[in-house]
């Protein structure tokens, strides 16, 4: 088998954060951070990095004040 025969399928679709109220965003990000840590504990560093990148993206958008929709 060649490496091209393998496909990584995401386990979960990305959440639609446009429906999350601004006052609930910190709680949502804390949940993502916990999921990131859990993935790292299971040595799933690729998934942990994906969570990290998503958290950074959402925090940057919140700081800039860009609409998430």
Image (cartoon, rainbow, N blue to C red):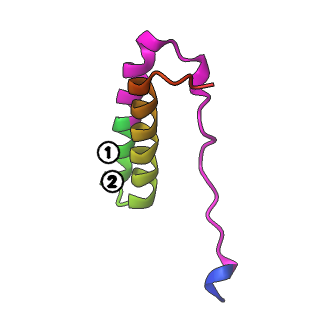
Name the residue that disc number 2 marks: 40
In depth, the one of 69 and 25 nearer the eye is: 69
Q: Residue at x 46, y 50 (%)?
A: 50
> Looking at the picture, how far across and down is residue 21, in whole percent?
51, 12
- Disc 2 packing (10 Å; few <14; some 14–19; many ≥20): some
Q: Residue at x 63, y 41 (%)?
A: 13
Residue that sits furthest to the right in the current view: 5
Residue that sits furthest to the bottom in the current view: 1
Q: Residue at x 62, y 28 (%)?
A: 16
Question: Mark 1 and mark 2 in contact (Cβ < 8 Å)?
Answer: yes
Name the secondary structure under disc 1. helix
- Count of marks overlaid on the render: 2
Position of 10 with respect to 58 (left or right) is right
Viewport quadrant of the N terminus: bottom right
The magenta-colored residue range is 5-32
> Looking at the picture, how far across and down is residue 7, in whole percent?
66, 69
Magenta segment includes 14: yes
Q: Is residue 43 above or below residue 12?
A: below
> Looking at the picture, how far across and down is residue 56, in whole percent?
39, 40
- Disc 1 packing (10 Å; few <14; some 14–19; many ≥20): some
Q: Is residue 5 above or below residue 56?
A: below
Q: Is residue 63 above or below residue 11?
A: above
Viewport quadrant of the C terminus: top right
Q: Residue at x 38, y 59 (%)?
A: 45
Q: Which mark is residue 37?
A: 1
> Looking at the picture, how far across and down is residue 28, in whole percent?
43, 24
In depth, the one of 8 and 58 nearer the eye is: 58
Name the secondary structure under disc 2. helix
Q: Quadrant of residue 29?
A: top left
In depth, the one of 56 and 41 nearer the eye is: 56
Q: Quadrant of residue 43?
A: bottom left
Q: Is residue 61 above or below residue 25?
A: below
């Amino acid at each position: 088998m060649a490496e091209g025969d393998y496909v990584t399928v995401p386990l979960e679709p990305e959440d639609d954060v446009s429906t999350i109220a601004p006052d609930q965003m910190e709680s949502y990000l804390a949940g993502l951070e916990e999921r990131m840590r859990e993935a790292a504990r299971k040595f799933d560093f690729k998934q942990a990095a994906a969570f990290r990148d998503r958290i950074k993206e959402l925090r940057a958008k919140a700081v800039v004040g860009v609409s998430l929709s």
